[in-house]
Image (cartoon, coloured by chain):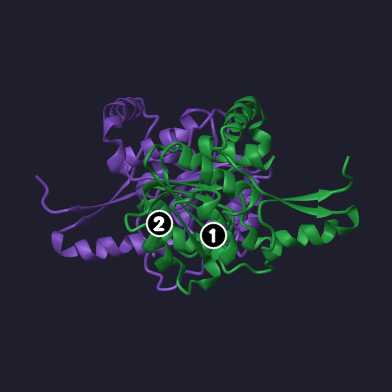
Chain colours: A purple, B green
Amino acid sequence: MPGLTAYAGFFEVCSPKKGERVFISAASGAVGQLVGQFAKSIGCYVVGSAGSKDKVNMLKTKFGFDEAFNYKEEHDLAAALKRYFPEGIDIYFENVGGAMLEAVLLNMRYHGRIAVCGMISEYNQEEPAGVRNLLNIMSKRIRMEGFVIFDYWHLYPQFLERTTKGIKEGKIVYIEDITEGLENAPSAFIKLFTGENVGKVVVEVARE
Amino acid sequence: MPGLTAYAGFFEVCSPKKGERVFISAASGAVGQLVGQFAKSIGCYVVGSAGSKDKVNMLKTKFGFDEAFNYKEEHDLAAALKRYFPEGIDIYFENVGGAMLEAVLLNMRYHGRIAVCGMISEYNQEEPAGVRNLLNIMSKRIRMEGFVIFDYWHLYPQFLERTTKGIKEGKIVYIEDITEGLENAPSAFIKLFTGENVGKVVVEVARE
């Protein structure tokens, strides 16, 4: 499911073109790591953010991102994005929301596209702070679009073909975060919110 | 220009279909009044908001909106929208931003579309309050898109044909808010922000 989410979200929702500048938040997650590789495969410039030094290294060395940064070490997210995108962002693959989205909007290029896959920073907020600069959507003619995988099952065959080929050729890699034992499922789930996971969180019930 | 803005924003950005439920904020403005009439012309259900009793009456009697309400008289905008759209909004033509957008997001239907034409409530805010429920964009698969007229000049001939025909047949009407004398231009401009204008604000420099 994360695979098809990445595929549909990037190729269908983002309308990507070769050479465009792509930013992915929560990029070491199950979806983000694959979006970055899809984007690289068509010749985009790709930057991801993640929440630890190890994840940042992994994005650059294992997944082939052009750049990556640890958002926890940045006091000014908008300035960080400006550093990696001096000419602005064409495509933002949104997994985070809130302050990150605000910083991105400041750095988007005209006719930019934002695919809203998730907004994990907002899920448990009783009173979210709010995004204060939506005016950028108008002035920069940005398209922002939410999507869920249920609308894209028909793309499964072409997703599978592209991804299987990539994996066989060693051009697509992935990492799963495996927790053993059903009794540990709750703590595995919580990883998604503390940012401890790297890649898809899998609970292994029994090894066959 | 307001005419082509209404035309392109509605027909191109909103992807409207017959029978869909359309909400327009600042609906008595130069753009809003025409969007509503375009929406009615293809069989949509159309509701507009405005800031005075007179404007609300005008939307219903002169421009043929199905319903209209005075947003200044509503303590709970989300509840007001729920009243007029018990099944939700398919298309929102956005001229206001802020609290109105928040209320709309709560009432949007799945696969809804928001054309961002303006956000007049936000233009002079030093610290806008922010829109806190953007998560709806993801969960409801909403497309939100900013646009400006400069990208749509090529539609001018078809806009002109459709609108001229409509005006000749009496199916499209419009109101201009004319201020006489160039020396009164500043106060005419300020009308846009105080909400005093009805329709396009025109400064008449000299009557030929």
Q: Nearer the viewer, mark 2 or mark 1?
A: 1
| Quarter of the rendering occupied by the N terminus of chain A | top left
- Name which residue type carries label 2: Asn
Q: Circles 2 and 1: CB distance less than 8 Å?
A: no
Q: Position of residue B8 (x, y in %)?
A: 58, 36
Chain letter belonging to callout 1: B
Chain letter belonging to callout 2: B
Which element is circle 1 on? helix
- For mark 2, what is the residue? B136
- For mark 1, what is the residue? B57
Q: Taking A191 as reference, is B35 left or right?
A: right
Q: Position of residue A7 (x, y in %)?
A: 37, 36
In the depicted structure, whether residue A195 falls above or below residue B142: below
In the depicted structure, whether residue B105 falls above or below residue A20: below
N-term-proximal mark, 2 vs 1: 1
Mark 2: few/some/many CA within 10 Å (<14, 14-19, 20+): some
In the depicted structure, whether residue B137 falls above or below residue B83: above
